[in-house]
């Protein structure tokens, strides 16, 4: 089965959409960065480097320092699909990220988004 198109899409192409979605709901770019860094283990410089290098999602997650151990606590529906039931590990990580940005845009407290 061929890989999904999003795996080869540059993360830098989707990142501004995450920020726009959050900003439309009065959240900030810094908050978007915080949830991305929480999930992936990147620091701010590492995240910026991934954006500048135009790495695709596959590379972005492959080079991520460490997926947060509490990422398994991310539950819910994104695009009609339950994130906890996604079988492909890379697609699940992408859906986790989508879910975190959705929660941010919906006004959820950052402490709850980060599962603390």
Image (cartoon, rainbow, N blue to C red):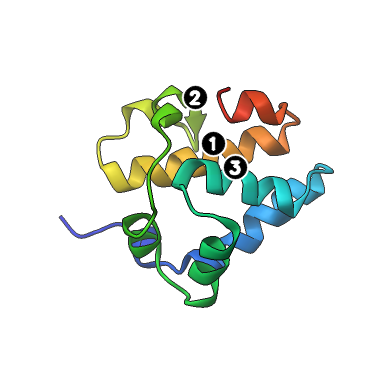
Pick whichever of labels 2 and 1 is earlier in the sequence: 2
Residue 33: x %, y % from top left: 63, 51
User: Mark 2 sits on what residue?
Assistant: 76
Which mark is drawn over residue 35?
Answer: 3
* Callout 3–callout 2 Cβ contact below 8 Å: no
The residue lying at 57 percent from left, 67 percent from top is 48
- Nearer to us in this view, 25 or 113: 113
Q: Can residue 10 be seen in this view?
A: yes
The residue lying at 69 percent from left, 55 percent from top is 19
User: Mark 1 sits on what residue?
Assistant: 99
Task: Give the distance between the C-alpha atoms of the residues marked 2 and 1, in whole angstroms.
Answer: 7 Å
* Callout 3–callout 1 Cβ contact below 8 Å: no
The residue lying at 63 percent from left, 53 percent from top is 18
* Callout 2–callout 1 Cβ contact below 8 Å: yes
Task: Name above or below for residue 55 compared with residue 36.
Answer: below
Q: In which quarter of the image is residue 72?
A: top left
Decide: few, some or many residues near mark 2? Use Cα within 10 Å; few <14, some 14-19, many ≥20: some
Along the horizontal axis of the image, is 6 left or right of 76? left
Along the horizontal axis of the image, is 90 left or right of 17? left
Identify the element where label 1 is drawn.
Answer: helix
């Amino acid at each position: 089965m061929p890989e999904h198109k999003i795996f080869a899409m540059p993360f830098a192409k989707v990142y501004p959409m995450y920020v726009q979605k959050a900003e439309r709901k009065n959240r900030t770019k810094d908050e978007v960065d915080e949830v991305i860094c929480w999930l992936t283990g990147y620091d701010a410089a590492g995240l910026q480097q991934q954006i500048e290098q135009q790495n695709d999602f596959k590379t972005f997650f492959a080079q991520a320092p460490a997926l947060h151990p509490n990422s398994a606590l991310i539950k819910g529906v994104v695009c009609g699909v339950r994130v906890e039931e996604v079988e492909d590990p890379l697609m699940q990580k992408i859906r986790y990220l989508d879910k975190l940005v959705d929660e941010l845009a919906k006004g959820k407290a950052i402490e709850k988004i980060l599962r603390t």
